[in-house]
Image: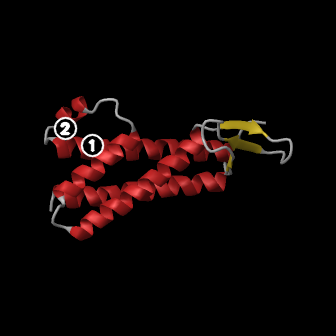
Amino acid sequence: MPPDDDQLRAIGRVTLLFNDLEHSMNLLVWRLINPDINIGRIVLEGEGFDRMLKRLTRLSQEVAREDLELRGTIRQWANRADNVRIRRNGVLHARWIFSLASGEMVAVRGLGKAPGEVDISAAALDRLANDIHHVAVELESIGRRVLYP
Protein backbone atom coordinates (compact mmCIF):
# COMPACT_ATOMS: atom_id res chain seq x y z
CA MET A 1 0.00 0.00 0.00
CA PRO A 2 1.70 3.25 -1.10
CA PRO A 3 1.40 6.55 0.75
CA ASP A 4 -2.00 8.14 0.22
CA ASP A 5 -2.57 11.39 -1.66
CA ASP A 6 -2.69 13.48 1.54
CA GLN A 7 0.67 12.08 2.67
CA LEU A 8 2.21 12.68 -0.76
CA ARG A 9 0.93 16.27 -0.79
CA ALA A 10 2.32 16.86 2.70
CA ILE A 11 5.68 15.31 1.77
CA GLY A 12 5.83 17.71 -1.16
CA ARG A 13 5.19 20.65 1.18
CA VAL A 14 7.90 19.47 3.58
CA THR A 15 10.37 19.04 0.73
CA LEU A 16 9.73 22.36 -1.00
CA LEU A 17 9.52 24.44 2.17
CA PHE A 18 12.72 22.94 3.55
CA ASN A 19 14.46 23.57 0.22
CA ASP A 20 13.38 27.23 0.39
CA LEU A 21 14.58 27.49 4.01
CA GLU A 22 17.95 26.01 3.09
CA HIS A 23 18.36 28.34 0.11
CA SER A 24 17.41 31.42 2.17
CA MET A 25 19.86 30.41 4.88
CA ASN A 26 22.62 29.90 2.33
CA LEU A 27 21.95 33.31 0.76
CA LEU A 28 22.25 35.00 4.14
CA VAL A 29 25.53 33.19 4.92
CA TRP A 30 26.96 34.10 1.50
CA ARG A 31 25.88 37.73 1.99
CA LEU A 32 27.47 37.88 5.44
CA ILE A 33 30.73 36.60 3.99
CA ASN A 34 30.76 39.15 1.16
CA PRO A 35 28.23 41.57 -0.39
CA ASP A 36 28.92 39.73 -3.67
CA ILE A 37 27.06 36.52 -2.77
CA ASN A 38 28.91 34.62 -5.48
CA ILE A 39 32.09 34.79 -3.36
CA GLY A 40 30.40 33.03 -0.44
CA ARG A 41 28.65 30.59 -2.79
CA ILE A 42 31.95 29.55 -4.36
CA VAL A 43 33.79 29.29 -1.03
CA LEU A 44 31.07 27.20 0.65
CA GLU A 45 29.83 25.18 -2.31
CA GLY A 46 28.52 21.77 -1.26
CA GLU A 47 28.18 22.52 2.47
CA GLY A 48 25.30 20.68 4.12
CA PHE A 49 22.45 22.25 6.07
CA ASP A 50 23.90 21.53 9.50
CA ARG A 51 27.28 23.09 8.66
CA MET A 52 25.68 26.13 7.04
CA LEU A 53 23.44 26.50 10.10
CA LYS A 54 26.52 26.61 12.33
CA ARG A 55 28.17 29.13 10.00
CA LEU A 56 25.08 31.33 9.95
CA THR A 57 24.79 31.23 13.72
CA ARG A 58 28.44 32.19 14.20
CA LEU A 59 28.52 34.88 11.48
CA SER A 60 25.25 36.54 12.48
CA GLN A 61 26.18 36.55 16.15
CA GLU A 62 29.48 38.19 15.28
CA VAL A 63 27.68 40.89 13.30
CA ALA A 64 25.22 41.35 16.20
CA ARG A 65 28.02 41.29 18.78
CA GLU A 66 26.62 44.25 20.73
CA ASP A 67 22.94 43.25 20.53
CA LEU A 68 22.42 40.60 23.22
CA GLU A 69 18.71 40.28 22.50
CA LEU A 70 19.37 39.56 18.81
CA ARG A 71 22.11 37.07 19.72
CA GLY A 72 19.58 35.20 21.91
CA THR A 73 17.02 35.28 19.10
CA ILE A 74 19.60 33.82 16.71
CA ARG A 75 20.45 30.99 19.15
CA GLN A 76 16.78 30.15 19.67
CA TRP A 77 16.14 30.23 15.93
CA ALA A 78 19.13 27.95 15.27
CA ASN A 79 17.73 25.41 17.74
CA ARG A 80 14.34 25.46 15.97
CA ALA A 81 16.03 25.20 12.55
CA ASP A 82 18.05 22.20 13.71
CA ASN A 83 14.88 20.63 15.12
CA VAL A 84 13.03 20.87 11.78
CA ARG A 85 16.13 19.49 10.02
CA ILE A 86 16.14 16.44 12.29
CA ARG A 87 12.39 15.90 11.89
CA ARG A 88 12.53 16.37 8.11
CA ASN A 89 15.42 13.92 7.83
CA GLY A 90 13.48 11.44 9.96
CA VAL A 91 10.70 11.49 7.39
CA LEU A 92 12.63 11.72 4.14
CA HIS A 93 15.50 9.40 5.03
CA ALA A 94 13.43 6.72 6.73
CA ARG A 95 12.34 3.48 5.09
CA TRP A 96 8.61 3.60 4.38
CA ILE A 97 7.00 0.18 4.78
CA PHE A 98 3.54 -1.30 5.15
CA SER A 99 2.91 -2.43 8.72
CA LEU A 100 0.93 -5.64 9.02
CA ALA A 101 0.26 -4.79 12.67
CA SER A 102 -1.39 -1.42 11.99
CA GLY A 103 -2.45 -1.90 8.37
CA GLU A 104 -0.88 1.47 7.49
CA MET A 105 2.31 2.86 6.04
CA VAL A 106 5.00 3.53 8.65
CA ALA A 107 8.44 5.08 8.39
CA VAL A 108 11.25 3.29 10.21
CA ARG A 109 14.60 4.87 10.89
CA GLY A 110 17.63 2.88 9.82
CA LEU A 111 19.86 0.84 12.07
CA GLY A 112 22.61 3.48 12.10
CA LYS A 113 20.30 6.10 13.63
CA ALA A 114 18.07 5.97 16.65
CA PRO A 115 15.72 3.13 15.66
CA GLY A 116 12.00 3.56 15.81
CA GLU A 117 8.97 4.60 13.86
CA VAL A 118 8.35 8.13 12.64
CA ASP A 119 4.84 9.59 12.48
CA ILE A 120 4.09 9.97 8.77
CA SER A 121 0.41 10.78 9.00
CA ALA A 122 -0.65 13.63 6.75
CA ALA A 123 -1.45 15.69 9.87
CA ALA A 124 2.04 15.17 11.33
CA LEU A 125 3.67 15.98 7.99
CA ASP A 126 1.57 19.14 7.67
CA ARG A 127 2.64 20.20 11.18
CA LEU A 128 6.26 19.71 10.14
CA ALA A 129 5.74 21.73 6.95
CA ASN A 130 4.13 24.52 8.97
CA ASP A 131 7.03 24.49 11.45
CA ILE A 132 9.52 24.71 8.57
CA HIS A 133 7.58 27.68 7.17
CA HIS A 134 7.65 29.46 10.56
CA VAL A 135 11.41 28.90 10.86
CA ALA A 136 11.86 30.42 7.38
CA VAL A 137 9.75 33.47 8.31
CA GLU A 138 11.84 33.93 11.46
CA LEU A 139 15.00 33.71 9.32
CA GLU A 140 13.75 36.56 7.12
CA SER A 141 13.30 38.73 10.20
CA ILE A 142 16.74 37.82 11.53
CA GLY A 143 18.32 38.48 8.15
CA ARG A 144 16.85 41.98 8.03
CA ARG A 145 18.07 42.72 11.55
CA VAL A 146 21.55 41.38 10.88
CA LEU A 147 22.05 42.98 7.47
CA TYR A 148 20.37 46.31 8.23
CA PRO A 149 20.94 47.06 11.93
Label 1: how many residues lie within 10 Å, few (<14), some (14-19) or many (20+)? some
Judged left or right of residue 17, residue 119 is right
Would residue 4 be visible to someone looking at this image? no
Where is residue 139 shown, x and y percent of the image?
Answer: 33, 56
Q: From the image, tell me which residue sits under label 1.
A: 27
The reply to whether dot 1 and dot 2 touch (C-beta < 8 Å) is: yes
- The image quadrant where one finds the C terminus is bottom left
Q: Residue furthest bottom?
A: 69
Residue at 60 percent across and 40 percent down: it is 113
Amino acid of disc 2:
Ile
Judged left or right of residue 84, residue 43 is left
Where is residue 130 shown, x and y percent of the image?
Answer: 51, 57
Residue at 28 percent across and 48 percent down: it is 56
Say the numbered circle drawn on residue 37: 2
In what element is the residue under mark 2?
helix
Where is residue 46 shown, x and y percent of the image?
Answer: 34, 30
Say the numbered circle drawn on residue 67: none
Amino acid of disc 1:
Leu
Label 2: how many residues lie within 10 Å, few (<14), some (14-19) or many (20+)? some
